[in-house]
Amino acid sequence: MHPMLRRLDDLAAHLATRPDTLALLGLGSAGAEHDRLDAHSDLDFFLVVADGAVARYAESVDWLAAPCPVAYSFRNERNGRKARYADGIFVEYAVFTVDELALLPFTGARVVWRRPDAPAGLDRCGPPPRPATPYDTVEFHLNEALTNLYVGLHRELRGERLTASRFIQSYAVDRVLALLRLTAPQAAVHRRDPFDASRRVERAYPPEVLPLAEMVPGYRHNRAAARATLGWLTARFPVDPVIATAVRDLLATDADG
């Protein structure tokens, strides 16, 4: 058994001794797809507790430390914490009641432990995550990517390199991933993460399809990144010549010009 799965089992054995706990759900690579666990995995889980017990379990780590001492932790949200065990296992978890859990969007959960009288189906996800925009179309993502490049290059020319890198090497690339999802879905069936499109894309798309090294070359290379992404877009989609020309003009503009 993988050490992280054993840690969850040991934690569940302790939680079963506490009358105000109801279930422990493994998530991510500790969930239904636990064959993905490797040396770089985090241990993600939900703890389901009785009404009125959330604050106590979110604030204290005494229960978390039952299988192994906790060397580091901090409360990163109202319901949860990030922590590192003394043996190096890093965990991220949140604590919910049954009613709170029913309202959450999540997927791929695995019931590690539940009380016999706990409600059934706790590992079934709640409502799906709301899309960032209702305009989930090729036209929308294409033009978002182009305008991200345009705005980013203007900020690069102004000397605002960090925000430029975010527009060019992050926001625009996110739109590229959305375009691939819509136009090449058969290439991206490798366990897509519905909450983070950047997860495992290297396994889904080879470099000749998604040249990330050219699109995300780093802080000092915003122009090269914009040029690569513009070339990728124009080679695959009908790009509006007005915005394409505007981006090319910025690429040809001197920083002090």
Image (cartoon, rainbow, N blue to C red):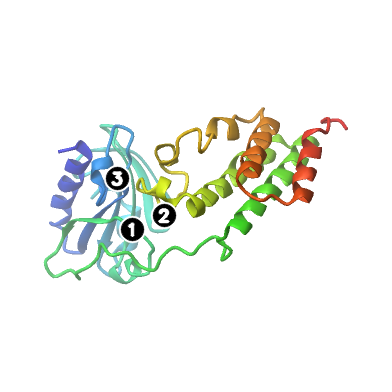
Q: Which residue is mark 3?
A: 29
User: Where on the picture, by quarter, is residue 51?
Assistant: bottom left
Disc 3/disc 1 C-alpha distance (Å): 11 Å
- The residue under the point 24% across, 52% down is 32
| Residue 41 picture location, percent across and down | 32, 38
Kind of residue at disc 1 = Thr
Q: Judge by depth and name the residue closer to the eye, 19 or 137.
A: 137
Looking at this view, name the residue that lies furthest to the top: 220
Q: Position of residue 235 (x, y in %)?
A: 63, 41
Residue positioned 68% across, 48% down in the render: 146
Q: CA distance from mark 2 to mark 1?
A: 8 Å
Q: Are marks 3 and 2 in contact (CB under 8 Å)?
A: no
Q: Which mark is residue 107?
A: 1
Of mark 3 and mark 1, the one earlier in the sequence is 3
Residue type beneath disc 2: Pro
Q: Is residue 243 above or below residue 155?
A: below
